[in-house]
Amino acid sequence: VVVDSLDARGAARYDFTLTDVRSLGFIKVAPRFNFASVYYSRDQAGQENQVGAVWGAGIGANTAVTGTFRTGLGPLQAIRHVITPSAAFVYQPPQTNLLYRGTDGLFRPRFDGVSGISLSAAEVRRIDFSLRQDLHVKWGDPVHPHVINNLFQLQNNISYNELAKRSGAKPLSDMSRSLTFKPIDRSDFAFTFVHNPYDWKLLAFSASTGIA
């Protein structure tokens, strides 16, 4: 619950999500339903004690391909490579009842203006794609090797917006790529890259490290 001290408005938000995971052979399928509701003591149209709600649904699928290689190269005893591709369809219907017409004739969101509590009336039809690769190793003594899980982890994410052409935008989102390196327990080195998928121009880069 948030109260805006500048214009004495109160607002509250409730979120509900229902997810189920099912295995269909080597593929895991996860349907999802989400519901969000807000209360405003006065909305942007000036009406008091208003409630708005939106719902959305989606379905995701993923699988894992695993390969294990025994190397015998010095202290490196074995390598396990896991590739996990996934895709998810996300849908939210348009909610015109969450809009009001301003004095200039333009439609604006009714439930906005209180920090952190709002609802989007926009229709969403999007497909999210992800490809994760994990590298695990066995290192050291052949009889009692040390297992390093997730020595390297590479994650790629991109989305396809089916409604992009309505606004003249390109359907593919920026591609985000994260690389994590964990050479010892309780340590990690993380790098994040963001590329334009149309010309592969680097848009953003960040690096961080931590030791627990």
Image (cartoon, helix red, strand yellow):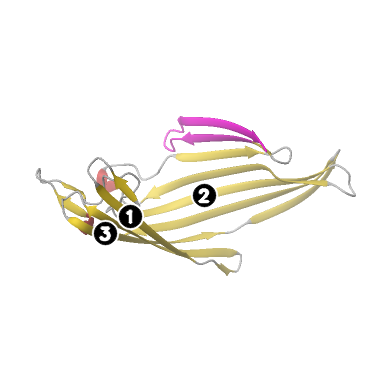
Residue 172: x %, y % from top left: 39, 44
Do residues under tags 2 and 3 come within 8 Å of each other at their CB atoms?
A: no
| Residue underneath mark 3 | 52
Residue 30: x %, y % from top left: 50, 64
- The residue positioned 60% from the left and 36% from the top of the image is 190
Q: Nearer the viewer, mark 2 or mark 3?
A: 3
Q: Is residue 204 magenta?
A: yes
- The residue positioned 22% from the left and 58% from the top of the image is 50
| Residue underneath mark 2 | 130
Classify 10 Å Cα crowding around label 1: few (below 14), some (14-19), many (20 and above): some
Q: Secondary structure at mark 3?
A: strand
Residue 71: x %, y % from top left: 82, 44
For residue 97, which quarter of the picture?
bottom left
Point out which mark residue 12 bears.
1
Magenta-colored span: 189-212
Q: Nearer the viewer, mark 3 or mark 1?
A: 1
- The residue positioned 44% from the left and 38% from the top of the image is 197
Answer with left or right where residue 186 lies relative to residue 140.
left
Classify 10 Å Cα crowding around label 2: few (below 14), some (14-19), many (20 and above): some
- The residue positioned 56% from the left and 39% from the top of the image is 178
Answer with left or right where residue 168 lies relative to residue 135.
left
Q: Nearer the viewer, mark 2 or mark 1?
A: 1
Amino acid type, callout 1: Ala
Earlier along the polypeptide chain: callout 2 or callout 1? Answer: 1
For residue 59, which quarter of the picture?
bottom left
Do residues under tags 3 and 1 come within 8 Å of each other at their CB atoms?
A: no
* Principal secondary structure, stretch drawn in magenta: strand
Amino acid type, callout 2: Ser
Classify 10 Å Cα crowding around label 3: few (below 14), some (14-19), many (20 and above): some
